[in-house]
Amino acid sequence: MTKSINLSLLLCLVITAIAYAQDNCKGKANTFDIYTDEPVLVNQTNGGWLYKTGGANNTVHVLHVYGNPYQMGYAHGALLRDQIQQMMPMFMSYAVAAVTQTAKATPSFFPQYILNIIQTEGVLAALDSIHYTTAPYTNIEFYEEIQGLSEGADFDYQTLVRMHMFPELIKASCSIVGAWGQASVGGNLFQLRALDWGIDNPLVNFPTFIVYHPEEDNGNPFSVLSWTGFIGALTGYSQRTGVSEKVWSGYSGSFSYTGTPFYFLMRDIIQYDSSIQEALTRINNAQRTCAIFLGVGSNSTNTLNVVEYSHDTAAVFNDQTPFPGFAPTPAAHPTLTDLVYVDKHVQPSNDPCMAALLQYSYGKIDAQALINIVSLFQTGDLHIGIYDFVGNQVYVSVANTNVPYPNPLNQPMSPSYQNQFIQFDMNKLFALAPPKNI
């Protein structure tokens, strides 16, 4: 009876929100209840557990890995060997085609020297060039983990490294929200990361929620919403900190691949940093490469900052700072107390939808309100993560996983904002003990 009453209340709230934003938003309500069943154990190995969870059209692997970087990578590879061997060739073919097409259609998207490599030597050579350029600035632990991943999965190391360089070439249009204090339920910090990267790619079939349990004195337990075989953090949470990212499409300054890939730096934040200030120190001290908006939430301050992150600068925005560019504040992006947000469009955005929905939900923003917002605004086609810091809960949704890439029968696909969200109790997941040696 309670569930029925709650669902009726949810539908009433969603219908009201639709009426409020109908002149500004094009999406439709996500009326699924949140999936709360416990993950089901699939397999285990020394140093790792593999579970599955989710509904019929958005099943997600839940992978727990333990130990040092090599051991965590090896467990990842061993438990998902078949999926890695299946996905990687498809993904690399997709990556080569995507980069080649972008180089032809929009050559200015790439630095001239990378464009020259793509045109004369090919995409794989360009990915290798990025690897050689970024490696001196990258935490060696990532390469140790990829080495373990390669050996555990019995798959080529160089191909895995190339796959990890791809996000430096092709960025995504995404949305970021942080709400706390007067803006949220109970004043608690809720953070949104909605990834818009398209759903016509092999990643759709291999979503993986990775829970890292590093060896003692090597950082926080943390989680990454990712894909089989990818260890960077485009979407990540540790309870101490959470990260969100969006490409800075309007950036007009310089950039260089001589630095740390942004998704490795984002993972270092959630693994090692316990506050926004620690994260900002890391960002300021880093050799930065491409231009993104980087959202960093912190449980210690119960706030979120957005950083204009680029090779040239690291400018910090909070709820008191007009965004973007400090001033003037765009009409479609009003400054609201205890609320920081960036929508999926090129900034400054003239789309009023997200601001209208946030203003409607102001004072009562929580995970469910953010689910309503992403569905009505239509952001987060590939995956979505919502972090509840005080409750230590993470809510995720992924694009439907039951249509095999490359979809030869042209079956209908549904983006993650239309699908059921899965709730993860991170109190339980972070506390899960490693398997006994088998």
Image (spheres, rainbow, N blue to C red):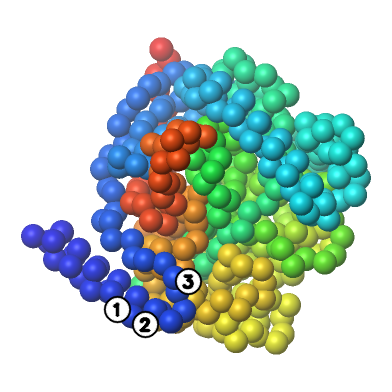
Badge 2: few (under 14), some or many (20 or more) residues near its Cα, within 10 Å? some
Q: Nearer the viewer, residue 389 or 12?
A: 12
Residue 370 spot, x, y in % from top left: 41, 66
Quarter of the figure with residue 373: bottom left
In this rendering, is residue 87 above or below 347?
A: above
In the image, taking residue 219 as reference, residue 165 lies left or right, namely: right
Q: Which mark is residue 179?
A: 3
Badge 2 or badge 3: first in the primary sequence: 2
* Tag in front: 1 or 3: 1
Task: Residue at 37% x, 42% y: name it.
Answer: 58
Badge 1 or badge 3: first in the primary sequence: 1
In the image, taking residue 425 as reference, residue 177 lies left or right, namely: right
* Tag in front: 2 or 3: 2
Q: Which mark is residue 371?
A: none
Please tell me whether mark 2 sits on a helix, a strand or a loop. helix
Total marks placed: 3
In this rendering, is residue 32 above or below 226?
A: below
For the residue marked with disc 2, what is the amino acid? Tyr
For the residue marked with disc 3, what is the amino acid? Ala
Task: Residue at 67% x, 19% y: name it.
Answer: 156
The residue that mark 2 highlights is: 20
In this rendering, is residue 15 above or below 380?
A: below
Distance from disc 2 to disc 3, alpha carbons, whole Å, reads: 20 Å
For the residue marked with disc 1, what is the amino acid? Thr
The residue that mark 1 highlights is: 16
Q: Nearer the viewer, residue 73 or 238?
A: 73
Q: Are marks 2 and 1 in contact (CB under 8 Å)?
A: yes
Residue 16 spot, x, y in % from top left: 29, 78
In the image, taking residue 432 as reference, residue 245 lies left or right, namely: right
Residue 311 spot, x, y in % from top left: 82, 58
